[in-house]
Image (spheres, rainbow, N blue to C red):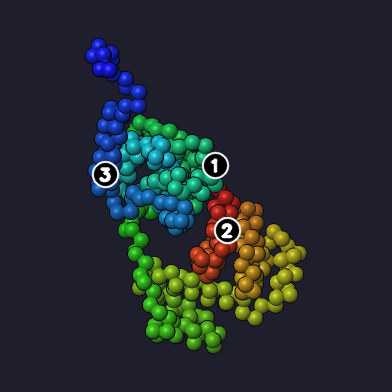
């Protein structure tokens, strides 16, 4: 039967062309603004890069993380406005976008009830900012407050060049530098071993093997000739003492009690603040470097560390 030409067409399920046009316009605006922003001022992060690209980087430059759900609510206008401001502020803050659908761990740790939402990070500490979208001038006022707070905490750096691409590590037997490291460790010359690894990192800052090696030399230095019984007794007698618990965690690491060392430092992380908090976080990161990402205890420990920090 032919359709009645007088009957209006149904628009159920039709595409909202106006909204689509607005979204495309916002995406174009964001792309243009990103091209004007300094290198490294606009980036995307996920659960695996959050520690290095947000927590560590926020020690020198404030990071504003915008959490979105790209498939459900991409918030193109908000991203476009913040990208424009990232260019206007010439790298005085870093804009990092994070999709909670593909990287849910950080959003869970931050207890974000809905997206889009923005959280600033200064010296690895989260500062909740807002939820939803706002006009660009209101966003500018928020950023000014973030920069003022960052300055009060001594964080006045700017976005620099992107981190270098991690090189392919050569095989250890063919690298004379590593032979020198192994010889130095065998004779207990930790200064010499450390000097080699630091030189390797100056030449290739992304060398994961050198980072792990440097962390391991530090662990060997701290545990060389320690009295294990005395360390255990001190840790048991003073569960809240920073030095005693760090020493016990080191002893657990060299004894291959990796989960126990992680758990000890995460418990400690929950009970300290200020510089002590950063000391424990750095020690945990060193442990992660030493055992490597394939260690089964690393992913849950990273998640627990994030929850303790937030």
Classify residue 25 as left or right of residue 146: left
- Crowdedness near tag 1: few (<14), some (14–19) or many (≥20) residues, C-alpha within 10 Å: few
Q: Earlier in the sequence, mark 3 or mark 2?
A: 3
What is the distance, in whole Å, between disc 3 and disc 1 at their CAs? 30 Å
Pick the residue in front: 130 or 208.
208
* Number of marks: 3
Residue found 47% across the figure and 82% down from its top: 181
* Mark 2 touches mark 1? (CB < 8 Å): no
Residue found 54% across the figure and 88% down from its top: 187
Residue 47, x across and y down, in percent: 47, 52
* Mark 3 touches mark 2? (CB < 8 Å): no
What is the distance, in whole Å, between disc 2 and disc 1 at their CAs? 18 Å
Classify residue 24 as left or right of residue 268: left
For this orientation, the residue located farthest to the top is: 6
Label placed on residue 111: 1
For this orientation, the residue located farthest to the front is: 1
Residue linked to disc 2? 301
Residue found 57% across the figure and 77% down from its top: 221
In this rendering, the answer to whether 130 lies above or below 108 is above
Q: Looking at the image, can residue 211 be seen?
A: yes
Residue linked to disc 3? 31
Q: Which quadrant is the N terminus positioned in?
A: top left
Q: Looking at the image, can residue 140 be seen?
A: no
């Amino acid at each position: 039967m032919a359709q009645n030409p007088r009957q209006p067409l149904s628009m159920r399920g039709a595409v909202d062309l106006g909204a689509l046009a607005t979204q495309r316009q916002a995406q174009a605006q964001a792309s243009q603004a990103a091209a004007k922003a300094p290198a490294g001022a606009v980036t995307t992060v996920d659960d695996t890069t959050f520690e290095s690209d947000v927590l560590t980087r926020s020690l020198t430059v404030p990071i504003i993380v915008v959490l979105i759900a790209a498939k459900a609510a991409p918030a193109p206008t908000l991203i476009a406005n913040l990208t424009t401001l990232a260019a206007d502020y010439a790298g005085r803050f870093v804009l990092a976008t994070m999709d909670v659908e593909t990287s849910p761990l950080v959003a869970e740790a931050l207890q974000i009830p809905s997206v889009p939402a923005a959280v600033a990070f200064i010296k690895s500490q989260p500062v909740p900012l807002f939820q939803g979208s706002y006009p660009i001038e209101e966003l500018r006022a928020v950023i000014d407050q973030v920069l003022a707070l960052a300055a009060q905490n001594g964080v006045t750096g700017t976005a620099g060049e992107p981190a270098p691409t991690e090189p392919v590590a050569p095989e250890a037997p063919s690298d004379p530098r590593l032979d020198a490291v192994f010889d130095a460790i065998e004779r207990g010359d930790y200064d010499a071993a450390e000097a080699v690894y630091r030189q390797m990192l100056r030449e290739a800052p992304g060398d994961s093997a050198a980072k792990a090696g440097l962390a391991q030399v530090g662990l060997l230095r701290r545990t060389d000739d320690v009295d294990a019984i005395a360390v255990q007794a001190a840790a048991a007698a003073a569960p809240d003492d920073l030095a005693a618990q760090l020493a016990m965690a080191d002893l657990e690491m060299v004894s291959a009690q990796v989960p126990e060392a992680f758990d000890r430092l995460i418990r400690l992380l929950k009970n300290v603040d200020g510089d002590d908090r950063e000391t424990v976080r750095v020690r945990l990161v060193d442990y992660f470097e030493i055992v490597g990402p394939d260690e089964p205890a690393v992913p849950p420990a990273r998640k627990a560390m994030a929850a303790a920090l937030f």
